[in-house]
Structures are given as structure tokens and as C-alpha cells.
Image (cartoon, rainbow, N blue to C red):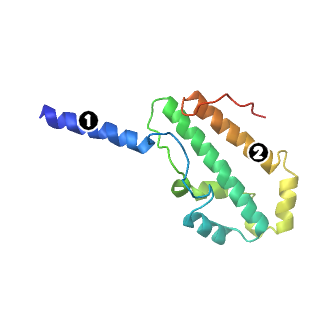
């Protein structure tokens, strides 16, 4: 009985380590960060023009940075943290919720104007979320490096 319990505990520990991987990373191997058949289908269904596609890709990146931050913060608290490629774990409903209201009825020009009238450029916003996620992972001991200044 004790031997069976010891084997079960060992398997659980190995399983947890395997989920996190030998390196705690969100890398996707050779796939691009936006790759995957599900993402292509998501764009085909939801991007009525090039600007909508650009925004959907942007908010996919934002979602991924938020998810990396959430995972690293969970790891820091000692909670389960599933590292690895996020492509197949995306919450496309959450990504759509980040889009401008009624974006599907907006023209490419309307969406472009929406972007221009924001307080923060898409690039600056992406960099901000990236740095916040990176800092959370550094604080948790997942990544090596110095904390980044967040604007």
C-alpha cells in the first residue's frame, strides 16, 4: 500500500514538472506567435477588412501577454501554472471583447480613425503589456533579467 502511494505521488510530481516543462517558457517552437489553424479560422470569421485583422492580431497579442502574466503570478504564489505555447489555449471570446464596440460594422477607415483617437498607440500598448508580463515573470523567478520600466 505504501509503495503504491509513493509511486502515485511520484507520478503526480513528474506530471506537474512535465506540464511546466524543463524550461518555463511560452515558446511555440517554429510556429509564429499568431500561428495556428484556429487563429486563421478566427480571422476569417471575424476580420471584415485589413484593419480589423490588424486589430484582432494586436488584441490576440495583448491577451497572450495578460495570460503570461496570470500564469507567472500563479506560479509565484505556488499555484498550478501551465507554461507552454498558448496558441491552442486562446480565449477568442475575450479577444473579441477587446475590440471596439460594433467593430464588425465599421469600415477600414473608421477602424483606422478609432486607432488614431486612442490615448495610446497600438505599438506602445503592446510594448506596455509585454513589459508588464515580462516583469511578472521575472518577479516570479521564471525569467532571468532586469525589471523593465513600464510606461
Q: Position of residue 11 (x, y in %)?
A: 28, 40
Q: Earlier in the sequence, mark 1 or mark 2?
A: 1
Q: Which residue matches tag 2?
A: 125
Q: Nearer the viewer, residue 97 or 40?
A: 40
Circle 2: is it few (<14), some (14-19), or many (20+) Cα within 10 Å?
A: some
Point 61% across, 33% down: residue: 136
- Name the residue located 64 percent from the left edge and 36 percent from the top edge: 134
Question: Where on the picture, by quarter, is residue 36?
Answer: bottom right
Q: Residue at x 59, y 39 (%)?
A: 69
Residue 98 at least partly seen? no
Q: Quadrant of residue 137?
A: top right
Residue depicted at 85% across the width and 45% down the height:
119
Q: Position of residue 145 (x, y in %)?
A: 64, 30
Labels 1 and 2 touching (C-beta < 8 A): no
* Secondary element at image label 2: helix
Q: Which residue is mark 1?
A: 9
* Residue 52 image position (x, y, % from top left): 75, 64
| Residue most extreme to the left | 1
> Could you classify mark 1 by the number of other residues whose Cα lies within 10 Å: few (under 14), some (14-19), or many (20 or more)?
few
Q: Which mark is residue 1?
A: none
Quadrant (top left/top right/bottom left/bottom right) for the N terminus: top left
Residue 117 position within the rendered picture, expressed as x and y whole percent measured from the top left: 88, 52
- Image: 60 above or below 131: below
- Which image quarter: residue 10? top left
How far, Cα to Cα, is label 1 from label 2? 44 Å
Quadrant location, the C terminus: top right
Comparing 19 with 29, the one in front is: 29
Mark 1 secondary-structure assignment: helix
- Say whether residue 5 is left or right of residue 48: left
Amino acid at each position: 500500500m505504501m509503495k503504491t502511494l509513493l509511486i502515485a505521488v511520484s507520478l503526480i510530481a513528474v506530471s506537474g514538472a512535465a506540464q511546466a516543462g524543463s524550461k518555463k517558457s511560452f515558446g511555440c517552437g517554429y510556429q509564429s506567435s499568431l500561428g495556428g489553424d484556429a487563429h486563421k479560422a478566427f480571422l476569417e470569421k471575424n476580420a471584415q477588412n485589413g484593419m480589423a485583422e490588424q486589430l484582432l492580431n494586436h488584441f490576440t497579442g495583448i491577451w497572450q501577454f495578460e495570460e503570461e502574466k496570470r500564469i507567472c503570478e500563479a506560479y509565484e504564489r505556488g499555484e498550478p501554472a501551465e507554461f507552454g505555447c498558448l496558441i491552442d489555449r486562446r480565449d477568442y471570446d475575450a479577444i473579441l471583447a477587446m475590440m471596439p464596440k460594433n467593430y464588425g460594422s465599421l469600415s477600414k477607415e473608421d477602424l483606422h480613425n478609432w486607432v488614431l483617437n486612442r490615448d495610446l498607440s497600438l505599438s506602445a500598448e503592446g510594448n506596455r503589456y509585454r513589459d508588464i508580463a515580462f516583469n511578472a515573470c521575472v518577479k516570479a523567478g521564471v525569467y532571468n533579467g532586469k525589471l523593465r520600466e513600464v510606461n
